[in-house]
Structures are given as structure tokens and as C-alpha cells.
Image (spheres, rainbow, N blue to C red):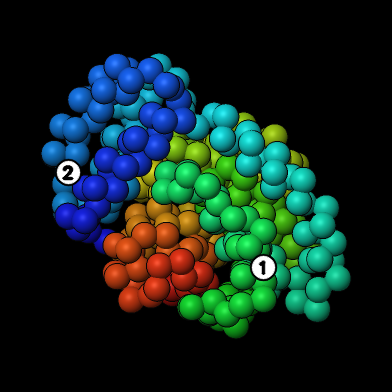
Amino acid sequence: MNTPIDCLTCFVRQSIIALDLATDDIELKRSVMRRVMPVIENTDFSMPPAWTTTSIHRVIREGLALDPYIGVKRKFNDSALALYPELRARIDSSADPLRLASRLAIAGNIIDFGIFTQVDLDGTINRAVNGDLFTDDYNAFRVAVNQSRRILYLCDNAGEIVFDRLFVEVLAELGKDVTAVVKGSPVLNDATMEDAEYTGLSSVCRVIGNGSDGIGTILPWCSPEFHAALAQCDLVISKGQGNFETLETERIAAGIAFLLQSKCEVLSRYLSVPTGAMMLRMTAGV
């Protein structure tokens, strides 16, 4: 996926969201934005949007000398953990725990403060569980899971990682060897090892960092440990829009199940889906 010109206004809006989360100091915001604008000006339109957004957020963290998302990450980890017992009980009583867990994992993808300033988590859970997915490759996904022993699970956001934990628990109960992947260091409200430990995911499966602060999964920036896990897995489960943007055209041996919500007009137009569409989209390995 290349970067269309429409993304430029979103780059500015995302920067303002991050600055508003971090500080009320107007002069500091102006100073950081002056450093951000040349990054936007030099956008490489041949690459996915995540490449430029990663560079923008590096500048923001450096200019602020802090991570602007640390507070919102803890807030939504706590909010999701409060829902965990009820959601776990619903999975346990479900006729198809894998299907329900996958739907909940897609619902959790709404927790994205790179794009939104507030989220309707309860409404999104209800829509994911009781409504139709715009792209629903669940039958192919279930076959892929049944045929796989080692699964690589690419996490996306904090808060959402609790929904990932539920999904990974179901996969583990099916006898699957799951390795979850988080960011190597902070970017946006993406999950890191700290979030995996705080939410209990690290007690359910092996968790590794990908060695990168890149948005999505930018393979040239990832660690040898990540590449080894990718080469050894039978199936990749990829959460979120950033991972889709950066992995959709990569040649990966294992099949990939993309679980996401289309949260912007650019991606929706690219996929020919309405904005807000929920998807479980299977792609074959090479």
C-alpha cells in the first residue's frame, strides 16, 4: 500500500492528538510541530503511510522528551482488564469459542489513539459479536488454525492486548504453540512488553518484542529474533490497520490472517469497504 496525498492531513491531525495528550504548553506544541512539518513534507509516497508516521512520532517523543501515550495506554489496559472476566465467561459458554474470540479481538482493535480521541468499546463489542463482518474468511481461518502448530500473533494496541490475550488463550487451549509479538519500544499507543506483562498476556504464551518502534511491522527494521519466529511459524495472525498496511504485499511463507477495522477513508477506499468495516481477511503464504 502506497501513501496517497490524503494522508498528509491525517499526519498533521495525529501529531496534534499526540501533543494534546502530552501537554497544555502551547509554545512547546508549536516548537514540536515545526520539527514535524519537514518530516511530512518529505513523505515518501511510494511507501506505506506507516513509514512516515513512524518518523513523525520519533520527532514528537524526542521533542517532548516523553511518551505522550503512556497515560492513555494504562487507562485502556485497565478498562479492558475490567471486562476480561465477563468476556472470558462468554467465550467459555460459546458453541464456537474460536469464532467468538476472533470477533472480540477485532472489536478490541477500536482502541487506537493514533486515529481516535475517544472510543465506544461496548458498542463495538456488540457490533462485532452480533453483526456481520464485511470480510469474513472465518471458515478458511479455522482450517488454517487446525492445520497449524506454531502461530505468530502480531499485537497492535494497548488495551486491545487484553482481547488478544483472550484469543491466545483459546488458541493455546486448542494445543497451538503461540508466540505473541509486541513493539520493541514505544510508539503511539501500541503494545510493548510492559503492556504484555501488565495485562497477563506474557503468562499465557511466549512474548517477544519485534526490535522496532515502527508502526505496523516494517520487516527491514525488525530484529533477528522476530525474523526467526516469522520463518518458523505456520500461520501469522496480524492485528490492526498498521500491520495490514506494512505486511499486505510482503512475501511471507506462512499464511496471514488479518483481523482489523478499517478506521480511515484512505484504507477503506483501498479495500473498497465502508469506513468502520470489520474484517477477518485470509491470505495464502508463498
How many numbered marks are there?
2
Answer left or right for 35 relative to 83. Answer: left
Mark pair 2, 1: CA separation: 38 Å
Residue 185 in sight here: no
Amino acid at circle 1? Asn
Answer left or right for 112 relative to 215. Answer: right
Residue highlighted by disc 2: 43
Q: Quadrant of the C terminus?
A: bottom left
Amino acid at circle 2? Thr
- Quadrant of residue 194 within the rendered picture: top right
Q: Position of residue 135 (x, y in %)?
A: 48, 78
The mark closer to the camera, 2 or 1, is: 1
Q: Quadrant of the N terminus?
A: bottom left
**Identity of the residue drawn at 76% across and 51% down:** 83
Q: Position of residue 68 (x, y in %)?
A: 46, 28
Residue highlighted by disc 1: 126
Give whichever of 240, 272 is nearer the camera.
Answer: 272
29 relative to 37, above or below: above
SS assignment at label 2: loop
